[in-house]
Image (tube, coloured by chain):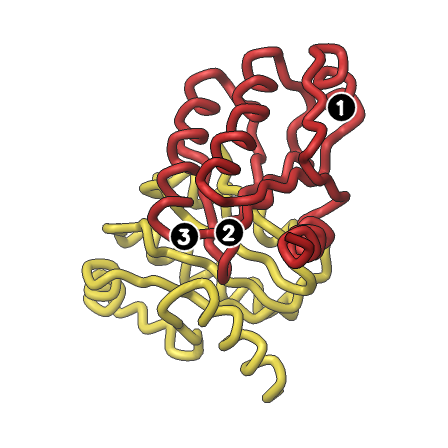
Chain colours: A yellow, B red
């Protein structure tokens, strides 16, 4: 099953509520970029609240999707990153330095609006 | 895979982007009711844009979930019902009479706010 991507005004909302395998992650990357293109979205919130563990491949895919979306003109915010996931990201040297993060979907959307206004 | 349910303020948003089989539909019903209970949501938008066909069992599950959510104090709005799906619902005698519908997620949320203000 593909991960559903919701469009709300100028934003795309994604809540990943399944453990990501490699194929699902790649499909998600492709679907998200296509959706940014087709909707002209300027911001994306990816909620990882239900993701309890990630491996190096998935971490790379998520890191890449931020840069790819950025090239297409859309800002990504991650929300709900769990302790184990944050540890994996840092251990792997994936710092997501320019990527805003927030606690949950509401705060992610607020942060996104704020980031986009500052640009 | 379970269908992801997003919480945004007092609302739950669901976009069904897969063909629903019987088990997925039953899981979805259970997950949604649990989520209404745990979040105290007062409204639910279920987007069916990507659902191209439904059978009588799924139609009944969707009809039931509206009544169940209502008992729990949450109003359901369906959005993006496709022609073939609307035909199936009417042919099966499922009129969803008291259920507001809208074209897409944005309009569904507006409709939900409007319905809840009228109460």
| Residue wearing tag 2 | B42
- Looking at the rendered image, the disc whose residue lies closer to the viewer, 2 or 1, is 2
Q: Are marks 3 and 2 in contact (CB under 8 Å)?
A: yes
Closer to the N terminus: mark 2 or mark 1? 2
In the image, taking residue A102 as reference, residue B43 lies left or right, namely right
Chain under disc 3: B
Residue A43 horizontal/vertical position (percent): 60, 67
- In this figure, which residue is indicated by the disc labeled 1? B86
Q: Nearer the viewer, mark 1 or mark 3?
A: 3
Quick check: can you spot residue A37? no
Q: Which residue is mark 3?
A: B40
Disc 1, disc 3: CB below 8 Å? Answer: no
Q: Nearer the viewer, residue A111 or A42?
A: A111
Q: Residue at x 43, y 76 (%)?
A: A100
Q: Earlier in the sequence, mark 1 or mark 3?
A: 3
Name the residue located 44 percent from the left edge and 31 percent from the top edge. B28
Element at badge 1?
Answer: helix
The residue drawn where x is 68% and y is 18% is B94
Vertical placement of residue A85 versus B85, above or below:
below
Location of the N terminus of chain B by quadrant is top left
């Amino acid at each position: 099953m593909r991960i559903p991507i919701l469009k709300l005004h100028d934003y795309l909302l994604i809540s990943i509520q399944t453990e990501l395998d490699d194929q699902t992650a790649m499909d998600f990357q492709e679907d998200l970029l296509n959706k940014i293109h087709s909707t002209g979205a300027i911001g994306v919130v990816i909620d990882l609240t239900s993701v309890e563990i990630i491996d190096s491949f998935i971490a790379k895919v998520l890191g890449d999707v931020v840069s790819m979306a950025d090239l297409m003109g859309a800002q990504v915010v991650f929300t709900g990153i769990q302790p184990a996931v944050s540890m994996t990201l840092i251990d792997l040297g994936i710092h997501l330095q320019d990527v805003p993060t927030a606690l949950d979907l509401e705060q992610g959307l607020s942060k996104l609006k704020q980031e986009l206004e500052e640009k």
